[in-house]
Amino acid sequence: MTSTAAADGVGSVRPATSSAESGQAEVAAAAGGGRPMAGRTVVVTGASAGIGAAAVRQLVGLGARVVLLGRCPRKAAAVAAATGATPLVADFARLAEVRRVAAELLELCPRIDVLVNNAGGVFPRRVVTEDGNELTFQVNHLAGFLLTGLLLPRLRETAGSRVVVTSSLINPLGRIDLDDLDRSRRRYHQFAAYADSKLANILFARELARRTAPGHPTAAAVHPGLVITEFGRDSWFVRTFYGRPLRLFGARSAAGGAAPLVRLASRPDPAAVNGAYLHRFRRRERVLVGRQARDPELARRLWEVSAELVGLDGLDI
Ligand SMILES: NC(=O)c1ccc[n+]([C@@H]2O[C@H](COP(=O)([O-])OP(=O)(O)OC[C@H]3O[C@@H](n4cnc5c(N)ncnc54)[C@H](OP(=O)(O)O)[C@@H]3O)[C@@H](O)[C@H]2O)c1
């Protein structure tokens, strides 16, 4: 992102200067060209910046009707104006806002073909939300879990529907402790909390896939690559030691980071990757996946505890 773009907060939706930069060519080629998503509705969270905003641009280019969710109304409106998507706003630090926006989505969308759970961040200090959860765990995992649960009836009505979750390469450093999900017993460290949440993303996708198989929605988690975005804006440490070295080591543009998400959203065979974790476009079962991410019992228990925490424990799935 350019410094100008960073200043206006919507840098990732500035006009792309080439098809390579926009990621559009890669996505269109993978999708077989044309407008393969015409008639489909896609909901993208964390779409007011970075990877999510770039995904919105690409999905609209493939013909999809896109509803984007952002935390900041100004930024969400700017992405919508630049792409033709429909903006909605919710702060995932407040589960009441997730419930409200889910109701708005059900009102707005007679079908939901794809839900991309992409919102996320890394937070330097331990904060407990008004819902009683540690902020990283809530924004990066619980809010998407709740949103998915509330949209499930509509996803189930839509044939071929799927859920895509943006996880991370950092997942093997995570360690889920079901007795300390709010990190009140362990010393808080931003990277550890972030890694736990990205591990939770994989467990969530796996368990959703298991619970819905052989029907729909299908689910997959994906690492988008190392991508230059606004990621880490809340953390001096991340901005300094992640952002600048990334630029030196050739990290991808937001458009390049969005391409694997868009591929999952548009591929004609979602069942082929149901429950999978992908490192960009490649499925990974052992390397680059933490041991806990392969534990089906942990996935089941995390689902149950998450459902209790967000008040979805009566969910029929
Ligand atoms: N960048 C990388 O190298 C990388 C690598 C692996 C995984 N990821 C994952 O990719 C996803 C997107 O990150 P990014 O790199 O595109 O970062 P980004 O530019 O910071 O975008 C993050 C998005 O999440 C939204 N968000 C943050 N906190 C929120 C909250 N409380 N409620 C609602 N929305 C919230 C942001 O909204 P606002 O703009 O309003 O703050 C923004 O739209 C994240 O899940 C991240 O973990 C990124």
Image (cartoon, rainbow, N blue to C red):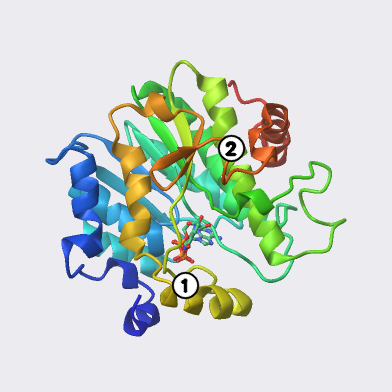
Q: Tags 1 and 2 in contact by the CB under 8 Å rule?
A: no
The image's mark for residue 88 is none
Establish if 204 lies above or below 159: below
Nearest the eye: 32 or 39: 32
Taking the spot 87% from the left edge, 56% from the top edge, the residue there is 185
Which is nearer the N-term, disc 1 or disc 2? 1
The image's mark for residue 286 is 2
Mark 1 lies on a secondary structure that is helix
Taking the spot 57% from the left edge, 46% from the top edge, the residue there is 288
Q: Position of residue 155 (x, y in %)?
A: 41, 28
* Disc 1 residue: CB within 8 Å of ligand 1: yes
Mark 2 lies on a secondary structure that is loop
Q: Position of residue 60 (x, y in %)?
A: 22, 49
- Residue at far left of view: 34
Res. 95 in view: no
- Residue at far top of view: 214
Q: Position of residue 83 (x, y in %)?
A: 23, 58
Q: Identify the amino acid type marked 1.
A: Leu
Taking the spot 37% from the left edge, 28% from the top edge, the residue there is 270
Nearest the eye: 154 or 182: 182
Res. 153 in view: yes
* Disc 2 residue: CB within 8 Å of ligand 1: no
Left or right: 306, with 150 as reference point: right
Left or right: 198, with 110 as reference point: right
Q: Which residue is mark 1?
A: 246
Q: Identify the amino acid type marked 2.
A: Arg
